[in-house]
Amino acid sequence: MPVIKRRGWEIPEHQATPEALFFDRRRLLAGAGAIGAAVLVPRSADAQRVSDLPDPSASLYPVPRNPKYVLDRPITDEAVNTTYNNFYEFGSAKTIARAARKLKIRPWTVKIDGLVEKPIEIGIDDLLKQMPLEERLYRFRCVEAWAMAVPWSGFPFAKLVELAKPLSSATYVRMETFLDPSVASGQRQSWYPWPYTEGLTLAEATNELAFLVTGAYGKPVAKSMGSPLRLAVPWKYGFKSIKSIVRFSFTAERPKTFWGSVQGNEYGFWANVNPAVPHPRWSQASEWMLGTKERRPTQLFNGYGEYVVDLYKGLENERLWA
Ligand code: MTE
């Protein structure tokens, strides 16, 4: 990413995402049946701000772990992961956790449109009810050469594709992040092509590894990490993992991506992890773990080749890497 600050693990304790917001969540949810939506809607000027209220999906977590996906390294410390982030909507430094607290995650409507049988608009809580939630331990690799290991919760992207019922002419899915410069100060920087967009082929989106994340560390995913809905595609560089998604559009053309539009020579569409192909500014030969700074050799497809290598057969002439 154009502006790099690598000292997120050194930030003071007081900047860490506050757990206090979650302390009361079970009691609040238990009472929600009796007092209904009123709990979530402040009615007076001194009521809590909407952006500060506990996540109403909290009672869904933790979800059962899928034992198929195992790690070769320890899980990254939650406090590190939630406070060292790329989320340009809230600033170009890694320390955006405090600013991201302004994000309003309810109501949150997800649009599914484009080449589908019938466009859908669905609230995130209705979507969560329809999707089979599970936990998966995945490695994560940023093109800036830092890496982490995360216990994500969410559901297979393939399940969303099933719900969307794309037409046979659809070959890509384009994803879009919210657009609200009043809460996301980064979106007032007009030189960026907001909203953030990303894309996958339909074959990639329905690969068993492609995962739509709604939680992490046994609770709803933190705002700094892309609440309430983000992507995890662990064989690709992290910039593909679009955060706070509001729209999925099925298309026949390859979608434009945010970083591809900003600097196409640095951020290719495929963005698969490859130790042998350096990014113009970062060698990809090795990576360092957030929290411990341990160095490890980079693995082709971030170690997930057995799942994804077939996706790229016949594309040898394309730029398959960053
Ligand atoms: N999604 C949005 N909407 N905005 C962003 O700036 N940054 C990307 C990706 N998704 C980004 C985004 C990049 S560059 C990375 S490395 C990952 O989010 C970082 O995810 P993390 O903060 O959970 O580690």
Image (spheres, grey):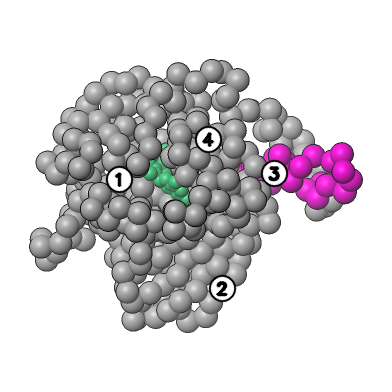
Query: Of label 4 and label 1, which has the lower sequence position?
Result: 4
Q: Residue at x 34, y 81 (%)?
A: 169
Nearest the eye: 188 or 169: 188
Q: Which residue is mark 4?
A: 96
Q: Amino acid at mark 4?
A: Ile
Task: Describe the element under mark 4 as helix, strand or loop.
Answer: loop
Task: Describe the element under mark 2 as helix, strand or loop.
Answer: strand
Task: Using residue 217 as the reference point, say whether residue 126 is left or right of it.
Answer: right
Q: Residue at x 44, y 58 (%)?
A: 193
Res 140 quadrant in image: top left
Query: Of label 1 and label 3, which has the lower sequence position?
Result: 3
Q: Is mark 1 within 8 Å of ligand 1?
A: yes
Q: Amino acid at mark 2?
A: Ile
- Mark 4 to mark 2: distance in Å? 32 Å
Query: Of label 4 and label 2, which has the lower sequence position?
Result: 4
Q: Is residue 115 above or below residue 303?
A: below
Q: Which residue is mark 1?
A: 237
Principal SS element in the magenta part?
loop
